Amino acid sequence: PIDGTTNFLHGIPHFAISIALKSKDEILSGLIFDPIKDEIFFAEKEKGAYMNNQRLRVSKKNSLNECLFSSNHEGVKFSNLNMRCSGSAALDLAYVASGRLDGYFQNKINLWDVAAGALLVKEAGGIVNNYDKFDINKIDIKASSAAINDKMMEKLKNF
C-alpha cells in the first residue's frame, strides 16, 4: 500500500509503503519504507522506534515558533504555526518520530495511512491524541512531542 499516491502518480519523490499489524484493538508493529531515500522506519509496541536500525526520538523543542508542523489540510491557515503539506501522512508521522517534524495533525484520515506512523511516534517518546480510540473508520489524529503537545492542542482546539 502506497501512502502519497498522488505524489507517486505525478512523479513527486515523496511517498512511502506503510504497513501495520493491529490485533485486538492494539497496533503492535508498524513499518514505513521510503524507497526514494532508502529509509526504513519501524516500531514494535514497547520496543522503541528505529530508522535503519538507529533509535528514534521526537524533537525536544518546546517553543512553537521554532517548530515545524505538517498537515494535509490544504488551504487551511493555522496562525503562528510553521506549516508544510507533504502529501504523505505516513512519512510525516515518521518524521515526527525522528524529530524532523515537530507535529502532525489531520482529520478524517484512513487508519491504514497513519497506524504505523502513530506507533512510531509513541515509541519515539511522543504523544498521539486519541490513539486508544483508533478504529477502521476515518479518524482524527494529532501527534507531537510531549514538550509541545499542550501548546499544539491549544492552537488546534477548533480544528
Image (cartoon, rainbow, N blue to C red):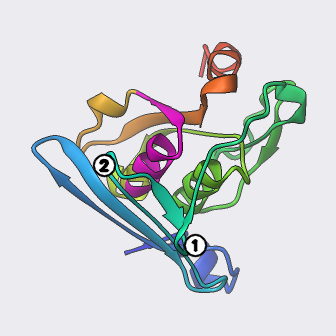
- Farthest residue toward the left? 24
Q: Quarter of the image holding residue 81?
A: top right
Quadrant showing the N terminus: bottom left
**Callout 2, which amino acid?**
Lys
Q: Quarter of the image holding residue 46?
A: top left
Quadrant showing the C terminus: top right
Q: Is residue 117 magenta?
A: yes
What mark, if any, has residue 6 been given in the picture?
1
Residue 133: x %, y % from top left: 28, 29
Start and end of the magenta stretch?
Answer: 116-129
Would you call the spot at circle 2 few (<14 residues within 10 Å), some (14-19), or many (20 or more)? some
**Callout 1, which amino acid?**
Thr
Residue under numbered circle 2? 45
As drawn, is 41 to the left or to the right of 26? right
Helix, strand or loop status at disc 2: loop
The residue drawn where x is 67% and y is 82% is: 37
As drawn, is 83 to the left or to the right of 5? right
Observer-nearest residue: 80 or 30? 30
Residue 30: x %, y % from top left: 35, 61
Does 98 sit above or below residue 106? below
Residue 86: x %, y % from top left: 69, 60
The residues bearing labels 1 and 2 have C-alpha atoms spaced at a distance of 30 Å
The residue drawn where x is 20% and y is 53% is: 22
The residue drawn where x is 55% and y is 36% is: 143
Q: Earlier in the sequence, mark 1 or mark 2?
A: 1
Q: Are marks 1 and 2 in contact (CB under 8 Å)?
A: no
As drawn, is 62 to the left or to the right of 71? right
